[in-house]
Image (cartoon, rainbow, N blue to C red):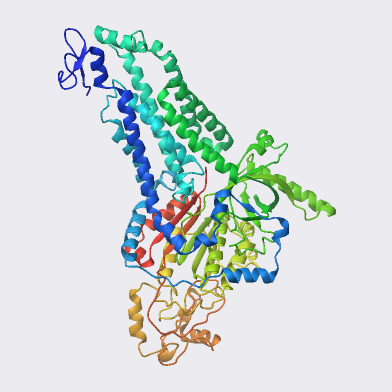
Amino acid sequence: MSNVCYDPTSGAPVPCGGFTGKCSAFMSFDGWYQTLYNSYVTDPEYQRYFTIAWTATLAFATLLTLPSVIESLRMGQWRRRSWAGLVLGISERPSSAAYQRIEDRAAEQESTQTAPRNPSRSFLHGPVAVLSSLYGTVSRFSLGAPLAKRFPRLAFPFGKLVLVLLIPLFYLLTLFPESQLRENPNRFGFLALAGLPPLFLLSSKNGAASWLLGKSWTTVNFLHRWLARTIVLLVLLHFYFWTIQVSQLDPTHLVETTFLTAHHPQYAPSGTAEFLSGSKERRGIGALSFLLLIAVSSAGPLRRYSYPLFFCLHYLGIIGFLTFVNMHTIYARTWATWSIGLIYAIDIFARIVTMRVKHVTVEPLGEGMTKIHIPFAHDGWRGGQHVQLRLFFTAPGRSFWSCFRSLEQHPFSIANASSSTTVLQSFLTLGGIDLYLRSCGPTTWTEDLYQTAFQAQQISQADPRHLGKKLNLFALLEGPYGGLDAFDPLKQETLLFLAGGSGMSFVLGTLDEVVGNRIRTRQGGRIEVVWVVHRFEHVEWFRLPLQALIEAASTSGLDLVVDLQIYVTTPFPDKGLDSETPFQKVVNARPNLPTLIQSSIDATLTPCRRCYPICRCADLRQDGMCGNDDEECVGSGTVANLRESIVELDGEGCGTEKGKKSCCYRVGSGLEENGELQEEKMVKRDQGSGCSNSNGSLGCCGAGAGAGSAKVQTRVVEGAIKVRQGGYKMIVCGPASMIVETRQTLSRIPLAKQVKLGGIGLHIEAYGV
């Protein structure tokens, strides 16, 4: 309700409660009106309140990252990581320095290896695990999950929803106090200006999100979009209320009309058209027009249809909006000139510092996949980060846009770790960076690049003089950006990587980083990799590096297991899986993600899965051997089954004594129904290191990892029960539907099970723009 009333005789505006306090009858009319509400004094104060609100939120988020920073420093990551390289970009190594004697390299690796750390838990571990598990369960729940299959983007996780709701909360708390929005809607405009600095801060690749929080700019980009939508709404309300304020002036209130005309000529009751034709109003309408251009061009369908068009319209709209809004009001200079200029200047300077002009090789891998190798890159990135890539090439005759491909810049994930960490040295003889680019369809930048590389390959194969030569192009690199959180030590004992299609490029780089760091720090654990592809031919894209990573983990001498499962969603002939294929766990089916994730978590809590007697071996390796003698496993069902196994085996030993079934059988092999004879044969097959019937032994451990185990060997055990409780984390890179289903599955994991695991972490890399 308005606080302004009108005198029935004179028509003059008067306070509804009479003249009290500062508004006395002896005050001049002009002085009373200014005292009633002066937006140019009151509204800037609430601009400062809004600024305090979002800066305090940023400070609180920074405070929450301090434990991760301290843990990263405690584990010595600052010694192994080139922070200067991460700030200054990719460091280069000359070709002469790329070669090193084997003796020197071995000595260097031996000197950098540290002794394994014994994990110790403080008294705060339990409460922290409970709180983090509770937060993860609530934040991952998607309210729109029932619509996720048809509309994946509607499944908004609750944690993101809470952060988004902070935006209208801060605006509502600063919009209504001491304001008269109908009579003077300047508060809308002032608060819209106050939202510009955080808007640009959230969009900058080199800003508070990466430097203070250690997170990628893509992680907070959803806040940038929702804040921008709120600013558009505020500007529209500012324009709407000023327009109706003039159009609804009552000419019978002569004193009011005379006063407004004398002090604000644009409010004269000569019509809305004349009001909108004023110079100040025209500039405001111009700023609104450019702001609407930004909003329309930022719509998801347009971004996906033509990212270059979105990019051009976005920057055109930003320049036009900032120009007109500074001409519209002098109060915009602090917020729309100096603050934004400082944020943008820092971002541009950091981008220029990280830019590199490189000579790269381009190779088509088939099925629309292109591999780019950037030689002589040495350090300054982490596996899984991405670089902005611009290639100087032209694909003539394909489409109109093919002539402008050199002007386009796109992000691509780095598929290997830096030379000080990577275990893929055999593929990176001269060091460097590998990028994998999947074609996005006809008339796209990636398709033009693939066809250009494919034609160059055909020409080189046709000419014996150029046989084996690859296409060489000049490239402009910028970055690196993104990846896992910079302050995340990734110390969880069990990791589950889930990749969909070309999302394996991100997973491969992160996996190389993890395996390299664990071998260096002598840390074991279990790493499960699940890759879902559309066709079996796509497996060839990453077959060799994946094989090298698995071999590096198995030959490290650590309790480090890398288990790979490949799901092919379209049928393929059995002959496609030949004897040379190193991956025995290839399933021709679409995976059931909830079942897969639940099975992985259960196997973490019960490592030997179907091994009913207690054993001391951890998960079986691919060759069927136990991983080590440091872990003990429990029954196949739940931990409660363990006590029953102890009672049954008390004094009986293991093996086939008294007709008791042996635990050394393979799941799904059909041996369960064939009695004791076949089971006994399996025991005798591995005699010497198999099940022991000696007194005092508590049993042995069978395979249970499913198909793919070549043989089964077991070991005698003693000691207390122990399961993997060093933490569990999922790293997902795939389409939106896969991400939504993963979040929903993790939100349904019982809290007690999460605490028992030591907490469940989740990192998401989403497809799309």
Q: In this view, does 610 lie above or below 63?
A: below
Can you tell which quarter of the image residue 688 is in?
bottom right
Q: Is residue 678 visible?
A: yes
Q: Is residue 551 above or below residue 267?
A: below
Please state the horizontal and vertical placement of residue 703, each as a whole percent of the image: 49, 76
Identified at 32% across, 67% down, the residue is 123
Would residue 145 appear left or right of 354 to someone viewing this image?
left
Taking depth in this image into account, of 663 and 757 the one nearest to the observer is 757
How many labels, in total?
A: 0
Please state the horizontal and vertical placement of residue 130, each as a whole percent of the image: 32, 61
Taking depth in this image into account, of 724 and 193 the one nearest to the observer is 193
Would residue 77 appear left or right of 95 to someone viewing this image?
left
Identified at 22% across, 12% down, the residue is 28
Q: Can residue 144 be seen in this view?
A: no
Can you tell which quarter of the image residue 150 is in?
top left
Taking depth in this image into account, of 59 and 298 the one nearest to the observer is 59
Please state the horizontal and vertical placement of residue 56, each as a whole percent of the image: 35, 43
Identified at 36% across, 24% down, the residue is 238
Taking depth in this image into account, of 506 and 650 the one nearest to the observer is 506
Of all residues, the one furthest to the bottom in this rendering is 695
Q: In which quarter of the image is the N terminus?
A: top left
Q: Is residue 394 above or below residue 495?
A: above
Q: In this view, does 665 lie above or below 168?
A: below
Please state the horizontal and vertical placement of residue 728, each as a whole percent of the image: 43, 63
